[in-house]
Amino acid sequence: MNGAPSSWEPEPTTINAMKRILALDGGGIRGVFTLEVLLRIEKLLHDYYARQDPAQARNFTLRDHFSFLAGTSTGAIIATCLAWGMTVEHILNLYLEHGPGMFQPLPWYRPIKKYLVAKFAAAPISEMLREIFVEADGSPATLASPQLRHGEKNNLLMVVLRNHSTGSAWPLTNNPLARFNDPAAADCNTRIPLWRLVRASTAAPTFFPPEKIQLGPAEYVFVDGSITPYSNPALIAALTAILPGYHVNWPTGPDKIRVVSVGTIAFSSELPVGDPRLWVGYFARSIPAALLQSIAWQQDYLCRCLGDCIFGAELDAEAGDLIAAHPQLAPPAGRSWFSYVRYNRTYKKQEMQRILRENPRLARIDAVDAIPHLRAIGQEYAAEHVKLEHLI
């Protein structure tokens, strides 16, 4: 990783004092965009640390900089791989190698029951995750794996999934002090194989079958974490680090916690005036995606209100971007629990229509044929917007 030094350098005391959260959205194969942004983040940070101590930076990965890695759905795959110690390039290669196979439709002769449950088989992604998250002795890794630096409060992982059996969001962490991570309990969450947790977080309804997990005497059915309020997991990760009930208890303040949130491209759900698609079938297909997008937007909005926003695109024409350096639009002075950065490419109106004409499947979570396009969008966005001063 080589490159010209940044013109901006922080004070060393700032580096040591601040804890950092990296939160990664859901979005299927559009996680390739996320990975291109993370490549830029990793390079900037590696180059910075190399200027401080070349020997220490030689094996640098993002888990060495970010104290807390959180992800939902495709973001859960990426966050867990980062927490496992992988480089971003390694994870991107996994997506390029295995991505097309994850979204191969099941054959027409499959049992009718499988037609009614999901479009794609779970086996390809399950097998990939089982191969990755394994201990040195060959046993399945869990949230308690030492490879995740389990037990260290400055090395936390969060995987967001939905417990379909109870109808509740489950943002699970490897924090040994968490209420449901007690190893003496029969249903201790840290006993769950890590590959199952990640697979469950990616089990998008109608695309992939749910994941069944045994916890003590009960079996639960889990689906995609994007079917919760935390498709964008930035806020729940920050609250987990702050609120007493989660037993992490980081000190608060914009100079003490930095949240860096990365999306998977946002496409406007608006229709042109007079569009002929206003019929029941279209609404049945479009409403779930519109709701997921709205929830992710709301989480971003709340993070900007509860923290000092350093960087982010305009939320809307009335609220603006809520960046703290823009006093005419920033929230009133008061409680500010963290500083906040939001990276995401947003397409609206004519621009969205143009890019979807060029690649109509780009907005879909299974758009494996759009991977080169997603990479190009991510590279262009990252080169323009990701800055070292946003990260440390």
Image (spheres, rainbow, N blue to C red):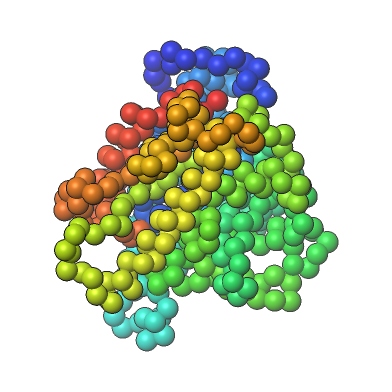
Rendered residue at 29%/46% (across/down): 347
Can you name the residue that lies furthest to the right here?
184
- Inspect this view and state whether residue 201 appears: no
Q: In the picture shown, does residue 163 fall above or below 338? A: below
Rendered residue at 20%/69% (across/down): 277
Image coords of residue 359 (percent x, y): 20, 53
Side of 12 where 295 appears, left or right: left
Observer-nearest of 371 and 317: 317
Side of 335 where 357 appears, left or right: left
Residue 60 in which image quadrant: top right
Q: In the picture shown, does residue 365 fall above or below 105? A: above
Observer-nearest of 98 and 389: 389
- Inspect this view and state whether residue 374 appears: yes
Q: Quadrant of the C terminus?
A: top right
Residue 101 in which image quadrant: bottom left
Side of 371 where 78 appears, left or right: right
Rendered residue at 37%/30% (across/down): 385
Q: Quadrant of the N terminus?
A: top left
Image coords of residue 21 (percent x, y): 58, 38
Image coords of residue 152 (percent x, y): 73, 40
